[in-house]
Image (cartoon, helix red, strand yellow):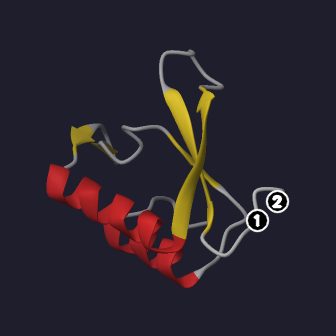
Amino acid sequence: RYGGLNNTMITGMIRQREFGAILLEPDSFAVGFPGFYAVDEAIQESLFDAVRAKYREAARLRSLGNGEMTLRMYLPVASEDGV
């Protein structure tokens, strides 16, 4: 829809919308686009702060990809585990 998302757009989406669940790898915000470039650690932390403000870590799962990273599942703070 956007052709690309910047940090401000991602943070806004996390703050303004409610998702049933968010699945992230520890390095989810470490690489920027277009191209591949390292994202400043302070920006990465601000994105995770936006997640933690409305969501709680509910589980750690094996990655669906190469299996090397653990996926972290975040659920809305008000949500029950049975979602």
Residue 40 in sight in this render? no
Q: Write down the residue under mark 1.
A: 80
Check the image and report above or below for 10 versus 24: below
Could you tell whether 53 is left or right of 7 in the image? right
Q: Quadrant of residue 12?
A: bottom left
- Disc 1 to disc 2, how far (Cα)? 6 Å
- Identify residue type, mark 1: Glu
Q: Position of residue 75 (x, y in %)?
A: 64, 60
At x 17%, y 50%, the residue is: 41
Check the image and report above or below for 46 versus 31: below
Which residue in the rendered view is the most extreme toward the bottom? 16
Could you tell whether 69 is left or right of 58 in the image? left
Q: Nearer the viewer, mark 1 or mark 2?
A: 1
Q: Write down the residue under mark 2.
A: 83
Check the image and report above or below for 35 versus 83: above
Classify the position of the N terminus by image quarter. Answer: bottom right
Q: Where is residue 71 in the image (x, y as percent from the top left)?
A: 55, 35
Classify the position of the C terminus by image quarter. Answer: bottom right
Q: How crowded is mark 2: few (under 14 residues within 10 Å), some or many (20 or more)?
A: few
| Tag 1 near tag 2, CB within 8 Å | yes
At x 16%, y 58%, the residue is: 42
Residue 12 in sight in this render? yes
Say which of 81 and 9 sits in front. Answer: 81
At x 42%, y 43%, the residue is: 28
Could you tell whether 47 is left or right of 13 in the image? left
- Identify residue type, mark 2: Val
At x 66%, y 25%, the residue is: 64
Q: Where is residue 39 in the image (x, y as percent from the top left)?
A: 22, 48
Q: Quadrant of residue 60?
A: top right
Say which of 59 and 33 sits in front. Answer: 59
Dot label at residue 26 = none
Could you tell whether 80 is left or right of 61 in the image? right
